[in-house]
Image (spheres, coloured by chain):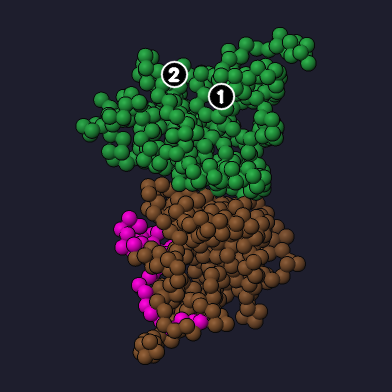
Chain colours: A brown, B green
Amino acid sequence: MIEEAKLLSSIMPMLKVPVHQVAGHQALDGHLGPLVDESGKFYKPLQKDDRGLREAEFYETFSSDDQVPDKIRKFFPKSFGTQIVEASDGSGPLPHLVLEDLISQYANPSVIDFKIGSRTWSPQATEAYIQKCLKKDRETSSLALGFRISGLQLYEGQESGYWKPERKLTIRYTADDVRLVLKKFVSSNQASDFKQDPDCTFASNVYGGSSGILAQLLELKSWFEEQTIYHFYSCSVLMVYDKELLVKGRQPSPAIKLVDFAHVVEANGVLDHNFLGGLCSLIKFISDLLTIPNECTNKDGMQNGE
Amino acid sequence: MIEEAKLLSSIMPMLKVPVHQVAGHQALDGHLGPLVDESGKFYKPLQKDDRGLREAEFYETFSSDDQVPDKIRKFFPKSFGTQIVEASDGSGPLPHLVLEDLISQYANPSVIDFKIGSRTWSPQATEAYIQKCLKKDRETSSLALGFRISGLQLYEGQESGYWKPERKLTIRYTADDVRLVLKKFVSSNQASDFKQDPDCTFASNVYGGSSGILAQLLELKSWFEEQTIYHFYSCSVLMVYDKELLVKGRQPSPAIKLVDFAHVVEANGVLDHNFLGGLCSLIKFISDLLTIPNECTNKDGMQNGE
């Protein structure tokens, strides 16, 4: 076994802990978690229960599913099968899902992870799992909002780095907290500064426009109003862009990505009403920022700052 | 008390048990249930716990809510306050909600009652009530479909009357059962005949067109994509039309109505993602019948009958 591990290590890519991961298990302090390489790949350890297997199966099915249009496929990470690599917790070589590292192209990513759906469990799950999820859905924002924020980091600047509130806080955000964070996400002032109102300077650059966050969410929504192939339980929508590029007058590449497919089940010809409802709720928060007068306006009344 | 009851009876309208009620408590065999009068009014007894009070409050708030556009108000029954009338179970005079009798204008109504939402309980409900609803949502179609059929009656003809499957069956309908019933709803053959495929003769007259069922549902949906005033838990969408009129070449008045507001709560600035998801699911079933080739076609390949 030791010989085998050594052999595998010798052909393994150089892996490191991802810097910009905001949710999920993290490969820090000897824990098991995902790793990334220099070429833009993300290595996610297969979880030991059947979750890992189910996520691997999902990627396999999805990648060859010709019912999924290309304009929707772009919201999903590319997948490259599974590979055995040295686990981050030092427990030896373990099978990992090899995926596209969605964040690697961003030097200074601001990221929010929304776990979509007021219900994170499928009717087919075990009773113990259902009770565990139901408890968490009731304790967090999921029931009220149709989603919860599983984690976030907002870029503040080269010196101050990122504002990264604790996950145990973000999962309980109220509607007002979510509104505030969505404003901070696109503001030029420091996200960690709660004394100043966020100025929403970059709202139209990031949320608006034909390739902005809102347009992408609406494209995703239109697919969920049609597709009766998959039900995505406990799946997240990632929202990401690079504020530093905007400050420098360049394209900030705002993007929507779907991640975490360990609880995807067959839709059996029925819409994913749970995901769709939560997605519509998120869309409403963002479209309000763009359309309601003064919702995203400087105190002096000038929209989109100076 | 007896004197008072006599006095009230003397000024009370002549009330009778509604003939076409498909769901909810029914005023039959000495039970407490709603009554109707000759003038098109529906008398719903206020339930003894706080449900009746909350429904009365909802109608009062809603009727004076100027945020609700007229094009949406038409989906709700008109309300005329409360009135004390003789209860159907002979228990004496009781306060009743006085509402528009939505079915009174139909001589031969085909009706389906869809209880919308995969969750019929609000987060604010009592633990006992939540557990009761959750159990029922899991045992019935609600979790899988985003709605369940609380009852239905389909008109067959002057002689054979109505096909009215038992409620304990309809609440457990699968996606395939729902598809079949939605076809039967608009077919010229007998709904109770399971040997023949439903011919969907009237699909385009009832579901299609600018004032058909689908157009009405889409109008309702567009409001639910905007409104952050109310969350409608355990509320039903009624779908009704008169097939006999169609057979005679007249307008069948297909209509969508919302009923049962005992569990409406404030939305606190968040979309009703639970109702919206379920509504989208129902819409998908109906739009598929109109748009998928052969989904609603005679065996001989002729669409919409002869």
User: Within the magenta stretch, is there residue A88?
Assistant: yes
For the residue pair B131 and B218, the one nearer the viewer reads as B131
Is tag 1's residue or tag 2's residue first in the polypeptide sequence? 1
Locate residue A272, reporting x and y percent.
45, 51
SS assignment at label 2: loop
Residue most toward the top? B10
Question: Considering only vertical position in the picture, is A212 above or below B214?
Answer: below
SS of the residue under disc 1: loop
* Residue A137 position in % (x across, y down): 59, 56
Q: Magenta segment range?
A: A61-89
Magenta span contains residue A127: no
Can you name the residue that lies furthest to the left here? Answer: B300
Task: Give the chain letter at badge 2.
Answer: B
Q: Position of residue A157 (x, y in %)?
A: 63, 77
Mark 1 to mark 2: distance in Å? 19 Å
Mark 2 belongs to which amino acid? Asn
Name the residue located 62 percent from the left edge and 80 percent from the top edge: A158
Q: Is A282 positioned to the left or the right of A219 in the image? A: right
Q: Residue at x 56, y 56 (%)?
A: A131
User: Can the viewer see residue B242?
Assistant: yes
Instruction: Look at mark 2 in the image and give the residue it sits on.
Output: B108
Mark 1, mark 2: which one is toward the viewer? Answer: 1
Quadrant in the picture for the C terminus of chain B:
top left
Q: Amino acid at mark 1?
A: Gln
Q: Which of the 4 image quarters holds residue B258?
A: top right
Residue under numbered circle 1: B26
Front-most of residues B32 and A217 = B32
Q: Chain of mark 1?
A: B
> Could you tell me which quadrant the N terminus of chain B lies in?
top right
Relative vertical location of residue A105 with respect to residue B143 in this rendering, above or below? below
Looking at the picture, how far across and down is residue A102, in whole percent?
A: 46, 71
